């Protein structure tokens, strides 16, 4: 591994392709000031999410795992004026930081943060018959990805795009005998992606300022 080179490359790509953004910088600064872990997506990864949402023509986005709202801002900015993003966050302190960041970004009318255990909130959405989402971004505890996927499919429609972040875990998922709960959860997540005939999926490993990791992409079919 060569982390300094990966960092330099991400910085180079960002210098060419991303405009300076005081709102996003402020969101990161507020998260750091609140001692949130620096596990938000990298800027170029945030732009990828933004472009995917635009390509999908998303009007409704569900995010599982808010942290400080950095990726939430990227995704919400891709929505039309009458769009809606709902982000789920278990930690009330994180949610408070995210809400302030969304307010500063003038996105509070489009994006909202729901506090509580994600699986329970998703179950409630299913029971309440919440309108399906066009894009779903999974970025929370990996051991529960199989359950998040199961419930997300009940909140999807044909054409829904589901992106699962942090699915490589520095290569740890290559160890099929691992007893790490996150790795076990991700193996089951991949099995569900592979075995469900409604799903068309791929996954990519990445290197960059966030180290060695990767993400999955799934299109929900009829």
Image (tube, rainbow, N blue to C red):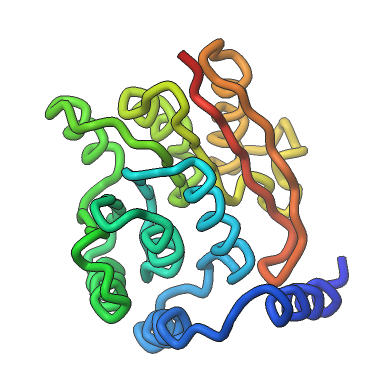
Residue 8 vs residue 142, the one in the foreground: 8
Farthest left residue in view: 128
Q: Position of residue 125 (x, y in %)?
A: 20, 34
Which quarter of the picture shows residue 47? bottom right
82 displayed left or right of 191: left
Image quadrant holding the N terminus, namely bottom right
Which quarter of the picture shows residue 186? top right
Q: Position of residue 219 (x, y in %)?
A: 54, 28
Q: Position of residue 94 (x, y in %)?
A: 30, 69
When the figure is inspected, residue 179 is found, relative to residue 32, above or below; the finding is above
Q: Residue at x 60, y 51 (%)?
A: 166
Q: Residue at x 71, y 32 (%)?
A: 177
Q: Position of residue 127 (x, y in %)?
A: 15, 25
When the figure is inspected, residue 221 is found, relative to residue 29, above or below; the finding is above
Please give the count of numbered marks on the rendered protein: 0
Q: Residue at x 35, y 83 (%)?
A: 34
172 displayed left or right of 22: right
187 displayed left or right of 128: right
When the figure is inspected, residue 207 is found, relative to residue 4, above or below; the finding is above
Q: Residue at x 75, y 37 (%)?
A: 175
Residue 34 vs residue 127, the one in the foreground: 127
């Amino acid at each position: 591994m060569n982390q300094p080179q990966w960092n330099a490359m991400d910085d180079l790509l960002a210098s060419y392709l991303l405009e300076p953004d005081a709102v996003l910088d402020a969101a990161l600064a507020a998260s750091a000031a609140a001692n949130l872990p620096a596990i938000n997506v990298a800027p170029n990864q945030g732009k990828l999410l933004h472009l995917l949402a635009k390509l999908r023509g998303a009007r409704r986005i569900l995010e599982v795992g808010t942290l400080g709202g950095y990726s939430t801002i990227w995704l919400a900015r891709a929505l039309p004026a009458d769009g809606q993003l709902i982000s789920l966050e278990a930690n009330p302190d994180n949610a408070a930081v995210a809400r302030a960041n969304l307010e500063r970004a003038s996105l509070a009318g489009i994006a909202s943060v729901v506090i509580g255990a994600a699986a329970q909130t998703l179950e409630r959405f299913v029971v309440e018959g919440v309108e399906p989402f066009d894009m779903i971004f999974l970025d929370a505890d990996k051991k529960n990805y199989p359950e998040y996927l199961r419930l997300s499919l009940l909140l999807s429609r044909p054409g829904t795009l589901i992106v699962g972040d942090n699915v490589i875990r520095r290569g740890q998922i290559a160890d099929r005998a691992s007893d790490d709960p996150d790795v076990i959860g991700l193996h089951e997540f991949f099995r569900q992606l592979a075995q469900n005939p409604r799903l068309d999926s791929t996954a990519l490993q990445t290197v960059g300022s966030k180290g060695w990791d990767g993400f999955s992409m799934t299109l929900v079919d009829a």
